[in-house]
Image (spheres, helix red, strand yellow):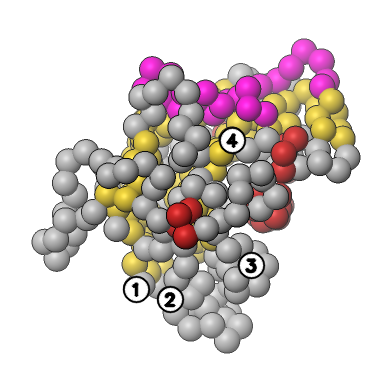
Amino acid sequence: MHRSTRRFLAALFTALCALPVGAVTAAATSASASASPSCGATVWKSAGKPWVCTFDDEFTAASIDRTKWSVVTTADSGYHSGTECFTAGNVSEANGYLALSSRRLNASIRCAKPVGVYYTRYTSGSVTSLGHFGQTYGLFSVRALFPASVIGGLQSSLWLYPVNATRYGNWPRSGEIDIAENYSDYAHLAIPDIHYRPRGSDPDVTNRNCVIKVGAFHTYTALWTPAGITISVDGTVCVHDAPHPSGGLAAPAPFNMPFMLNLTQAIGVTRNGPSQRTQLPATTYVDYVRVWK
């Protein structure tokens, strides 16, 4: 992940904590606001015991389930990752999919924040389970299709972030789990990233070995246990890390507290910044999000 993008992602949750979704209560870190979620066929642990479904959205409704997701907007949170304005109009649900879009407008619009305003020709879409769902450990699976673009300017992210974003200190000390990030300048790669402050190394564990077919659905999975985090694409392991944190922490910290779900389609930054050649509009489609424990 580009370092400037890391700073933007950290800023997102400073902003998200101000979203008007109410206080994060015990209910927000329980299985789900919906009763008895179903994740389809039984999934078995290696020990021969079944995983228990705790959160499921198959996106088969006509609109976003507001008991599971909040739509991230710049107007509410002040967040924008680059030059775009996050709006509710770029988030929709239909035909069995969640659609998160980025667009280039014909003219600049006024993008208001809680404090301040800026002008942009780009808009984007994102949702978060903040205030609705969070979980410590488990199996997290997202089936998604990233935009079929091979020209720089787009960034798609499927990621987890701590409900208490500063429990062990500011980002990355309290952790972040990027199940997959896709940059349109590297459209053939699904890049995982496990962020924290490990002893004696860069604050993330990642690789660029997970090749995907551009413009196709893939299943992105994070297996998170007290022993470590394994991220896979279509069943092929991309990265595994057993945390070895610095700063006086002991494993499994910082990955021992509830994390929330986040699905984001954004405009890229720095080397992956937008240009007139960027292929817009562009949409990430999510077929389902399933979580087990």
Residue sitting farthest toward the left: 48
- Kindly report the secondary structure that dominates the magenta region of the rendered protein: strand
Distance from the alpha carbon under mark 2 to that under mark 1: 7 Å
User: What x and y, as percent, mark residue 49?
Assistant: 14, 61
Q: Report the mark closest to the observer, 3 or 2.
A: 3
- The numbered mark at residue 227 is 1
For the residues labelled 2 and 1, say whether their Cβ atoms are less than 8 Å apart.
Answer: yes
> Relative to 282, is 264 above or below?
below
Callout 1: few (<14), some (14-19), or many (20+) C-alpha neighbours within 10 Å? Answer: few
Q: Left of 135 or right of it: where is 6?
A: right
Which residue is under mark 4?
71
Which residue is under mark 2?
252
Asked whether 94 falls inside the magenta stretch, the response is yes
For label 4, the SS is strand
Q: How many marks?
A: 4
Callout 4: few (<14), some (14-19), or many (20+) C-alpha neighbours within 10 Å? Answer: many
For label 3, the SS is loop
